[in-house]
Each structure stands twice: as structure tokens, then as C-alpha cells.
Amino acid sequence: MKFQRHREEIVLFDAAGKPLESWVEIRVHPVTGETSRIIHVPLKKVTLPDLKGMAAKTREGCPFCPEQLSHATPRFREPFLREWPMKQGESVLIPNRFPYDRYCALIILTEDHYVPLDAWDVQRIMDGLSIAQEFLRRVMDHDTSTQSFSLNWNFAPHSGSSILHPHLQLSAGSFATNRARRLLDASYLGMLKGRDIIAEWIEAEQTEGARWCGQIGLWHIILAFAPRGRFFEINLIHESLGSFPALEEEDLETLAKGVRNALNFVTAMGFVSMNLSLFSPLRNEGTFHPIVSISPRACIGPFQISDISFQMLIDEFFALFLPEEVARRFQNSLAS
Ligand SMILES: [Zn+2]
């Protein structure tokens, strides 16, 4: 597999006639064919929200804190989801009062109202993933028409989260999201031609080495060649074909460690907010490698400019960091 990139060198002149050199690199996602642009623009200071102050202001009356949770939460109608609340360690799964799919749940990850991005322990993340798996297995068993699911995490307000208390969002139904469909379809179409595109992608990254940051268990840690988001995107890609609901406990634990390491690195890069999404088939285990994607989020400058602009309408992202430079820093942080 060859990574496709097109670099444009651009020269302008300043008012005094002196050349101003710049460049843009248009990169093609190795699986979906989507393009991203790496742009040569200096990063202005990101605005870090006062999350401690926000935690103090929002703690009282928080619907996810233990004292509210027991009596203020709706229940599922389906008999196979009636066992309530579903719990694992500190993680509690509840219905999402504002559903966006046939089955829509929130997984409250901690009893603590606020956990900084670099203060996560593996067990808490693993319990959240494990309860998500249990929920999906029940849905699959009892509603055979479900075909897809989506597992996501908005962390802190600049990521789009409205409640600071840490929680995952989990949904299942008949229709995959756009990004999941593009990834899954591309891998499936490759299979029909006798190719495992994601295995080829992992192998090519490992051979080139510029963005591959090692393995944790069977998960490969790779800085996305064609990232989504304003800054960079970390991918954890499973070495084998499979699905999230069918992952073994050991795989969940190494995934949780990989996520914890990624969150620590995102913090070390100066961010306090991020989005995480997990891509996997619900049922078909032979056509895709589960992938987790993590991208930092931040507002910029004193006026808190959003990190997403018209990019949301054109469905293409302009990243400010070279993935290879970020990977070098991630590799060094893992080595130290
Ligand atoms: Zn809370």
C-alpha cells in the first residue's frame, strides 16, 4: 500500500517584494479515500477552559452524580434491558433521554463528577467498554434486525459535551453513521477483491514507521496519515479481523490501556478536551478490524474561536500539525 499525498508549494510576495513561502499537503485516507489537508499555519494559543471551576459550579444537581442517578433516570421499555441499572465497577449504563437511534444509552464512567484528561486509570475505562459490550450483546441477541452501533466520547465542553461528568454515548440500530459506513464498506469491498485493506494499512505503517507508535497487546497505535480534526488523530487499530462486541477481555484491557496512554499524550500536547469514536461492525466479524479514533479539541485565542469551521460543511479537515512530527513526540513519550 502506498500513501498518497500531493504537496503544493505556494509562493506569495510581501508588500516589500520579499517572497513568502508556504505549502499545503493534500493526503488521501488509505481506506476510505477521503482527503485531509495538512496546512502550514502557525498554531495560535489554544484557550484552555477552567474545568476545575466548571466542576465546582456544576457538581450540585449533576444528573450523573451518584445521589441523583438512582431516582432521576428513565428506564428502557424492552424487557431484555429492564435489569436496571446495569453496573460494572463505577460504570453505570442508563437510557439516553434524548435518543438518536433505536437503542441509545449513556455510560457514566465514574462516581467522580470530574476527572482530568490525564488522570484516568485503566480499570475505569475498561469497565465502561465492558458494559458497552454487554449492552450490545443483549441488543444483538434480542433484536436481530440491528445492524450497526456507534460508541463515542465527548470529553469536556470544547469537544461538544454538555455535561462535564464523564460519560460515553452508545447507540445501536439499523443505520451506520456516515464515517462508520465509509470505513466498513471500503474494507468489505476490499475483501470481495481478496484484499484485507486494513491489514495492508497496518503493515505499510509498520514498514514506513513514521507514524506507527508501537503496539499495546494486539492494538497498533498509529497517528493518522490523513487526520480528521484541527490538530491530529490517534488511531488504535486491532491487528485481527473482528468486532467490538466479540473482543476478548484481554483485548478490552489493552484497548483501555491504549486509550489511557493516548489521553495522557493529548494532555502532554497541551489539550484538555478530546473526542473519541470506535468503529466496528456489530455482527459481521470477518470483514473489518476494530478501530478507535481520538482527536484533541480546543478553542483558539481569547475569543474562543471554534477549531471546526466550514470544514464541517465541506467534510474535509485542515490539520495544523504534521502527523509524522506528532508521532515522533508520541514515540518519545512512550519510550521515556
Ligand atoms: Zn456529576
Image (spheres, rainbow, N blue to C red):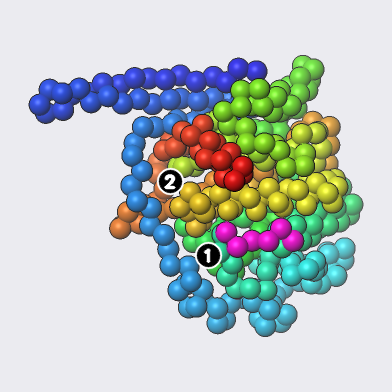
Q: Earlier in the sequence, mark 1 or mark 2?
A: 1
Give how far across and how far down residue 197 sits, in percent: 71, 24
Give how far across and how far down residue 69 sits, in percent: 69, 77
Q: Which residue is labeled 1 in the image?
A: 162
Residue kind at label 1, given as amino acid type: Ser
Q: Is residue 81 above or below residue 306?
A: below
- How many numbered marks are there? 2
Q: Is mark 2 within 8 Å of ligand 1?
A: no
Which element is circle 2 on? loop
Distance CA(mark 1)–CA(mark 2): 17 Å
> In the rendered image, which quarter is residue 181 located in?
top right
Residue at the location (77% across, 42% down)?
A: 217
162 with respect to 197 (left or right): left
Residue kind at label 2, given as amino acid type: Ile
Observer able to see residue 245: no
**Magenta span:** 118-123
Which residue reaches farthest left? 16
Residue at the location (80% across, 33% down)?
A: 240
Neighbours of disc 1 within 10 Å: few (<14), some (14-19), many (20+): few
Give how far across and how far down residue 212 sits, in percent: 62, 32
Which is nearer the eye, 172 or 161?
Answer: 161
23 with respect to 166 (left or right): left
Q: Which residue is labeled 2 in the image?
A: 308
Q: Is residue 117 above or below residue 249?
A: below
Q: Is residue 35 above or below residue 9?
A: below
Which is nearer the eye, 114 or 86?
Answer: 114
Circles 1 and 2: CB atoms closer than 8 Å: no
Which element is circle 1 on? loop
User: In the rendered image, which quarter contains the N terminus?
Assistant: top right
Give how far across and how far down residue 227 sits, in percent: 53, 35
